[in-house]
């Protein structure tokens, strides 16, 4: 039986590679977002812990140097957190764009795969017709031979 060949197979392979690359691009962005969100969580935990420690320092004699240290640290962390939130906002836009690009790449690949599947089904149907015609011809020849020999089945 002959082998099915899809003439646009190189294009389909390229579209698969393109889709894979778009998936990797999106994964990088999602990983970056996860890292930034983890940094924000870590900062929140650090500030909470520092507040708890500062609360202990405010009992009895107040250590103004510790209060000042906490205020400076808290200000720096808050500034960094605001920068990270801004970066996250930009990253969300990039993620949305990357998802749209991936969706388009997937759509193009699936369209070509659908075309390939249709051509394969058509090819398979043609192969079946050829096989049926060949078997019919063999049966006709066998019948004709048996008629010539006088053997009836």
Image: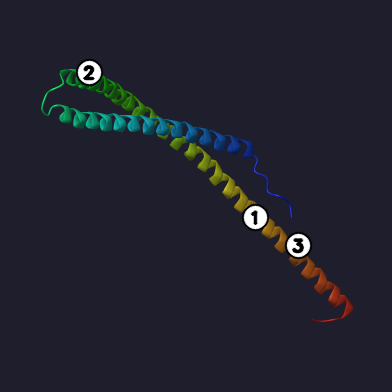
Which residue is rendered at x = 49% and y = 34% of the image? 24
Give the labeled residue for mark 1. 124
The quarter of the picture where residue 80 lies is: top left
Residue 137, image x, y percentages = 77, 65
Looking at this view, name the residue that lies furthest to the left. 60
Of helix, strand and loop, which one carries label 1? helix
Which residue is rendered at x = 71% and y = 58% of the image? 130
Give the labeled residue for mark 2. 72
Which residue is rendered at x = 74% and y = 66% of the image? 136
Looking at this view, name the residue that lies furthest to the front. 61
Categorize mark 2 by other alpha carbons within 10 Å: few (<14), some (14-19), many (20+).
few
Residue 105, image x, y percentages = 49, 35
Give the labeled residue for mark 3. 134
State which tag comes first along the sequence, 3 or 2. Answer: 2
The quarter of the picture where residue 135 lies is: bottom right
Q: Is residue 80 left or right of residue 26?
A: left
Above or below residue 54? Residue 15 is below
**Residue situated in front as seen by the camera: 103 or 74:** 74
Disc 1 or disc 2, which is closer to the eye? 2
Above or below residue 58? Residue 111 is below
Residue 73, image x, y percentages = 25, 21
């Amino acid at each position: 039986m002959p082998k099915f060949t899809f003439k646009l197979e190189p294009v389909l392979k390229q579209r698969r590679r393109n889709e894979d690359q778009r998936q990797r691009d999106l994964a990088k962005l999602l990983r970056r977002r996860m890292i930034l969100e983890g940094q924000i969580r870590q900062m929140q935990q650090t500030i909470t812990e520092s507040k708890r420690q500062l609360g202990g320092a405010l009992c009895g004699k107040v250590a103004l140097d510790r209060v000042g240290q906490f205020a400076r640290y808290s200000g720096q962390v808050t500034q960094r957190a605001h920068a990270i939130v801004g970066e996250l906002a930009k990253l969300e836009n990039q993620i949305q764009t990357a998802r749209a690009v991936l969706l388009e790449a997937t759509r193009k690949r699936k369209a070509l795969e659908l075309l390939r599947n249709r051509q394969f089904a058509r090819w398979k149907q043609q192969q079946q017709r050829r096989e049926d015609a060949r078997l019919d011809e063999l049966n006709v020849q066998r019948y004709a031979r048996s008629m010539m020999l006088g053997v009836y089945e």
